Amino acid sequence: MPDKNQIILPGTTTTIYQPNRVTNAKYRGFTLIQTKVFVSLIKQLQKAIRLDMEGKNWQQLDIFESPDKRLFKVGIPLADIGKPVQYREIAESCQALTRLSVKIQPPIGYTSIATLAARVDIPVKERGRSIIYIYLLREVGEQLIKIDKSTGGYPEKFTHYIYEVAMRSKNKYTAKLYQIISSWKARGGVRVTYQSLREQLGIEGSEYTEYSDFKRRVLAPAQKELENKADCWFDCNAKGFEEREGKKVVRLNFKIITPAHTEENNIRSENIKHLLRSYVEGFGERHIEKLSPIFTVRLDYHAVQLKLLELKDWLEKNRGRDANGAAINDVASWVCASLLNEFSDRC
């Protein structure tokens, strides 16, 4: 039975575009609500971002009309963030954005630090909805909007992700980590230092000082929220995910998994099962069930095919006897045990 929470792609989802400098921005102290407010803020800026990507003038949009030319305001419906019983908490969280700094790498090559919000109004009712207005300094707003361009004028160095995936997260690190891996999706994966990832996620040096805690409190919850429910995810339990120097984890190797990648693996998995049922004497569903632990996205299916050829050649050359010279009376169980012995530790 399919997961009722699974996002079916394509579907009624909202694609968010943002500069990579926003994806890679560093901010500490953000709560889950504040993270969602930030995502919603970027959503409200989408019209301007898309116009900028097309090389058009976005500064004529209504949101940039303000008596104070140093600021522009963005309205966020509180219902986008939470339920009515949470509105007071959401409003207070928005007010706190005037005291939280964001570290962004602008196109001109230096690091800037600014509070995300210059001012936040109390919520107002508009057309039956509660709206809170966040005022941004123009220089901050421009960094959230402007997309880098190639020499030919085409947009580059931007991230796109699904708004609904980010907003349904329950762990405060999931939305940020989702944006980060979305920026790597076209590359299929990336190798990052453990320390740089902690900094990107805004994790203080005193938090999760042991990698095991970081994995349990940050990586594993994010993986659970994204796996098979987003357009991309990762597996922090994959072999080779962690690189160590001595006992210390220093680098992480993210392999980005997508629904298309999963579907391809499902097809390969079924092909392997068909080969086993068709060409291994006595191979049945009980053997397939025993092998179920190895049929994961981490399995190298080409290696399995090669192993099956190797086992076939062994049987022929050794006249149905194992490495100890004993007769192999149950070929199906022998093949099953051989595959488990070879591939269990890789999955």
Image (cartoon, rainbow, N blue to C red):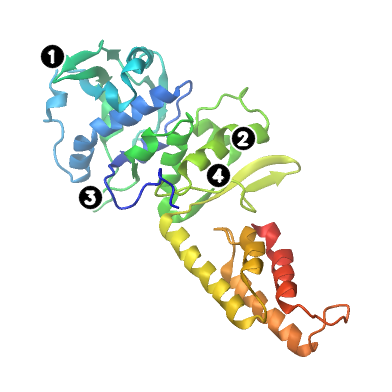
- The earlier-in-sequence mark between 4 and 2 is 4
**Of the residues shown, which amino acid type is indicated by label 3?**
Gly
Q: Crowdedness of circle 4 by 10 Å Cα count: few (<14), some, many (20+)? A: some
The residue where tag 3 is placed is 153
- The residue labelled by disc 2 is 216
CA gap, disc 1 and disc 3: 33 Å
Q: Mark 1 is on which residue type?
A: Pro
- Neighbourhood count class around disc 1 (C-alpha, 10 Å): few under 14, some 14–19, many 20 upward: few
- The kind of residue tagged 4 is Val
**Image spot of residue 187 (x, y percent):** 44, 55
Element carrying mark 1: loop
Question: Quick check: marks 1 and 3 in contact, CB under 8 Å?
Answer: no
Q: Which residue is mark 1?
A: 67
> Whole-Å distance between the Cαs marked 1 and 2?
49 Å
In the rendered image, the vertical position of residue 146 relative to residue 27, given as above or below: below
SS assignment at label 2: helix
Q: Quarter of the image containing the C terminus?
A: bottom right
Nearest the viewer among 233 and 65 is 233
Under mark 2, the amino acid is Arg
Number of the front mark, 2 or 3? 2
For discs 4 and 2, the disc positioned in front in the rendered view: 2
* Left or right side of 234 for 310: right
Circle nearer the viewer, 4 or 3: 4
Q: CA distance from mark 1 to mark 4?
A: 45 Å
Q: Which residue is mark 4?
A: 192
Nearer to us of marks 1 and 3 is 1
Residue 112 in view: no
x and y, in percent, of residue 108 in the image:
34, 35
Name the N-terminal-most of marks 1 and 2.
Answer: 1
